[in-house]
Image: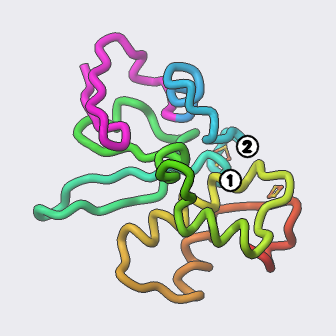
Amino acid sequence: MIQFLLNDRLITERELDPNLTVLNYLRGQQQRRGTKEGCASGDCGACTVTLGKVVDGEMQYQAVNSCLTLVSSLQGKQLITVEDLKQGRELHSVQQAMVDCHGSQCGYCTPGFVMSLFTLQKNSVGWDRHQAEQALAGNLCRCTGYRPI
Ligand code: FES
Ligand code: FES
């Protein structure tokens, strides 16, 4: 049995194959298809999600490739996906910035970029361009040429 938070909802899974990837779990069992499969081998970042865990009494967040992460590793953690960011009709500030700066074309990579920047924002009070570039080092885009992003 594993227990974890899917954003703010407690999930208890008793019969999952522990070798199932988080990517396939989200898309197949949770109907959360905002998380994309690009390479399925940890190279493109299209499948990026945010994992939170308690460290020394505080939540710390990490952007991970869900295609390489097994559901068994979710035990006791918080899993946040791109579906959790929008509040009502209001986009998260990272999503809004992607819209305002024309940072998305075909959109396939966009949830991954958004989740990498969201994770950076969750961990930092303030962040600069260099940190943003570091945070996006694992995200590939075939369309934008990166400048708008
Ligand atoms: S699908 Fe490319 S890194 Fe996961
Ligand atoms: S917008 Fe098409 S791959 Fe990035």
Task: Indicate which disc residue 56 carries.
Answer: none
Say left or right for 51 vs 49.
left
11 and 100: which one is in front? 100
Q: How far across and down, in percent of the image, does residue 113 sit?
A: 64, 61
Image quadrant where residue 149 sits: bottom right
Q: Which residue is mark 2?
A: 39
Which label number is shown at residue 43? Answer: 1
- Residue at (24% x, 60% y) in the render: 59
| Span shown in magenta | 1-22
Three-letter code, disc 1: Asp
Q: Residue furthest top?
A: 15
Name the secondary structure under disc 2. Answer: loop
**Label 2, residues with CA under 10 Å away: few <14, some 14-19, many ≥20:** few
Q: Nearer the viewer, residue 133 or 30?
A: 30
**Number of residues whose C-alpha sits closer than 10 Å to that of mark 1, classed few (under 14), some (14–19) or many (20 or more):** some
Separation (CA) of disc 1 from disc 2: 6 Å
Q: Is 68 above or below relative to 58?
A: above
Whether tag 1 and tag 2 are in contact, CB under 8 A, the answer is yes
Q: Is mark 1 within 8 Å of ligand 1?
A: yes
Question: For disc 2, does the CB lie below 8 Å from ligand 1?
Answer: yes
- Give amino acid for label 2: Cys
